[in-house]
C-alpha cells in the first residue's frame, strides 16, 4: 500500500494552509474557459501519507470553496472532499459513487466535472 495521491486546484482553496500537509510532486497550469470561473488555474499533484490523511480531510472540508472538490486516491479507495462534507468510495460501489456525484450536482458542479472512478486509475489526472 502506498500513499494517497490526488490533485488540489489552488483557486479552489479559501485557505492554502492545506497544501502544507501534502507533498507536492508536480504542478501544472490549465486555462479553463468552459468552467463557471474562467481563467488560468494552478493544479498541484499531491501525495498524502496515511499519518495525515484524516487531518487533510478535516482541513480540506473547511479550506475548499463551495462548488469545488479535492480527490485523493489510494489503491481501490477514493476520498472526495467538498466544503463541509467528505465521501469515501470503494471501487465498484455504485451506491457510494451515485451519492457523492449527486451531492456534487446539488452544490452546482456540472456533470463533466463530477468525480468518477477514472481517478482511481489516474489520480493525478
Image: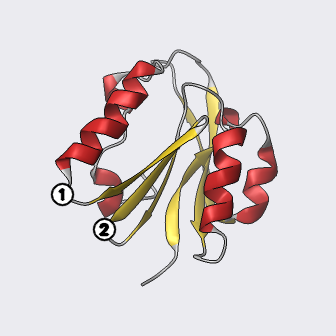
What kind of element bears circle 2?
loop
Residue 92 disc label: 1
Q: In front here: 53 or 109?
A: 53
Q: Which residue is mark 2?
A: 76
Dividing the picture into quadrants, the one containing residue 79 is bottom left
What kind of element bears circle 1?
loop
Q: Residue at x 33, y 60 (%)?
A: 120
Q: Residue at x 36, y 39 (%)?
A: 100
Q: Is residue 6 left or right of residue 75?
A: right
Q: Residue at x 60, y 48 (%)?
A: 8
Q: Is residue 81 left or right of residue 90?
A: right
Tell me if I can see residue 25 in this picture.
Answer: no
Q: Position of residue 113 (x, y in %)?
A: 39, 31
Dividing the picture into quadrants, the one containing residue 99 is top left
Q: Position of residue 94 (x, y in %)?
A: 18, 47
Q: In front here: 34 or 120?
A: 120
Inter-mark Cα distance, 1 to 2: 9 Å
Amino acid at each position: 500500500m502506498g500513499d494517497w495521491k490526488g490533485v488540489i486546484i489552488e483557486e479552489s482553496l479559501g485557505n492554502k494552509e492545506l497544501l502544507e500537509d501534502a507533498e507536492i510532486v508536480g504542478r501544472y497550469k490549465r486555462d479553463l474557459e468552459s468552467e463557471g470561473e474562467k481563467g488560468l488555474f494552478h493544479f498541484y499533484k499531491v501525495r498524502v501519507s496515511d499519518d495525515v490523511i484524516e487531518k487533510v480531510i478535516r482541513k480540506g472540508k473547511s479550506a475548499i470553496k463551495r462548488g469545488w472538490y479535492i480527490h485523493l486516491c489510494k489503491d481501490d479507495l477514493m476520498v472526495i472532499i467538498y466544503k463541509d462534507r467528505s465521501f469515501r468510495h470503494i471501487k465498484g460501489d455504485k451506491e457510494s459513487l451515485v451519492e457523492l456525484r449527486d451531492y456534487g450536482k446539488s452544490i452546482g458542479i456540472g456533470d463533466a466535472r463530477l468525480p468518477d472512478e477514472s481517478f482511481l486509475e489516474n489520480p493525478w489526472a
